[in-house]
C-alpha cells in the first residue's frame, strides 16, 4: 500500500513530467555601429500547468562553424512564466544595445526551460541556434 501511494504521488507531481516541449531559442542583430542591437528569445510549449523558469546563454566565436565558441553571458536573463498546459510561450524578444565596433564575431544562443525554479528538477535545453554575425561584444 505504501509503494502504491508513493507511486501515485510521483506520477502527480509536475517535477516528474517533461518540463516543456519544442524549446527553441533565437538571436538576431539589427542596426550598425553605435546603434547596433541584439535581440534574443526563447520559445516553448508547456507540458503541464504551472510555473516555468526560462533563461538563455549566448556563445561567441570568430568562426562561423562554431568551432571554438565560448559562453559570453555573465548574467543571463531569467523569467518565471505562469503557463497553461499545451500553450506556447515566448520569453522575449529581449533587446539590448551592443558595444560599438566592427562585426567580427559570430553568436549563438541556447535556451533552458525548467519547472518552477532556476535549478528546477526537470530541465529542457533548446538546440543551439544558427550562428549570426554581430557586434564585437555583448
Image (cartoon, rainbow, N blue to C red):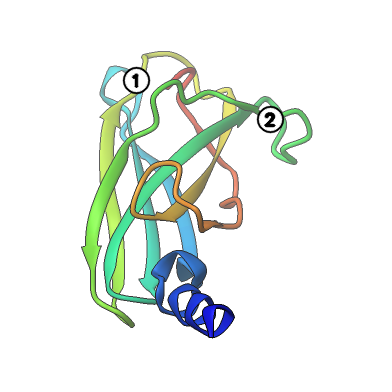
Helix, strand or loop at label 2? It is: loop
Relative depth, front residue between 86 and 100:
86
Q: Is residue 46 above or below residue 97?
A: below
Graded by Cα atoms within 10 Å as few (under 14), some (14 to 19) or many (20 or more), the crowding at tag 1 reads: some
Residue 119 x %, y %: 45, 42
Relative placement, left or right, of 92 versus 9 is left
The residue under the point 53% across, 23% down is 72
Residue 40 x %, y %: 37, 44
- Residue 69 is labelled as 2
Q: Residue furthest left?
A: 82
Q: Earlier in the sequence, mark 1 or mark 2?
A: 1
The residue under the point 33% across, 35% down is 77
Residue 112 x %, y %: 48, 50
Q: Identify residue for label 1.
A: 33
Question: How many numbered marks does the figure carry?
Answer: 2
The alpha-carbon separation of the residues under discs 1 and 2 comes to 23 Å
Q: Is residue 108 above or below residue 89?
A: above
The residue under the point 34% across, 27% down is 32
Helix, strand or loop at label 1? It is: helix
Relative depth, front residue between 11 and 89:
11
Quarter of image, res 96: top left
Residue 38 x %, y %: 35, 35
The residue under the point 49% across, 36% down is 57
Q: Are marks 1 and 2 in contact (CB under 8 Å)?
A: no
* Residue 22 shows in the view: no
Which corner quadrant holds the C terminus?
top left
Relative placement, left or right, of 136 versus 81 is right
Q: Is residue 90 above or below residue 99?
A: below
* Residue 105 shows in the view: yes
Relative depth, front residue between 117 and 100:
117
Amino acid at each position: 500500500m505504501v509503494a502504491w501511494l508513493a507511486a501515485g504521488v510521483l506520477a502527480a507531481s509536475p517535477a516528474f513530467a517533461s518540463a516543456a516541449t519544442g524549446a527553441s531559442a533565437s538571436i538576431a542583430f539589427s542596426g550598425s555601429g553605435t546603434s547596433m542591437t541584439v535581440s534574443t528569445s526563447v520559445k516553448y510549449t508547456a507540458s503541464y500547468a504551472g510555473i516555468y523558469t526560462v533563461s538563455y546563454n549566448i556563445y561567441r566565436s570568430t568562426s562561423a562553424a562554431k568551432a571554438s565558441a565560448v559562453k559570453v553571458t555573465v548574467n543571463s536573463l531569467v523569467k518565471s512564466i505562469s503557463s497553461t498546459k499545451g500553450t506556447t510561450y515566448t520569453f522575449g524578444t529581449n533587446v539590448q544595445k551592443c558595444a560599438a565596433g566592427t562585426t567580427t564575431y559570430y553568436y549563438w544562443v541556447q535556451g533552458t526551460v525548467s519547472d518552477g525554479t532556476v535549478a528546477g528538477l526537470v530541465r529542457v535545453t533548446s538546440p543551439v541556434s544558427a550562428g549570426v554575425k554581430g557586434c564585437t561584444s555583448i
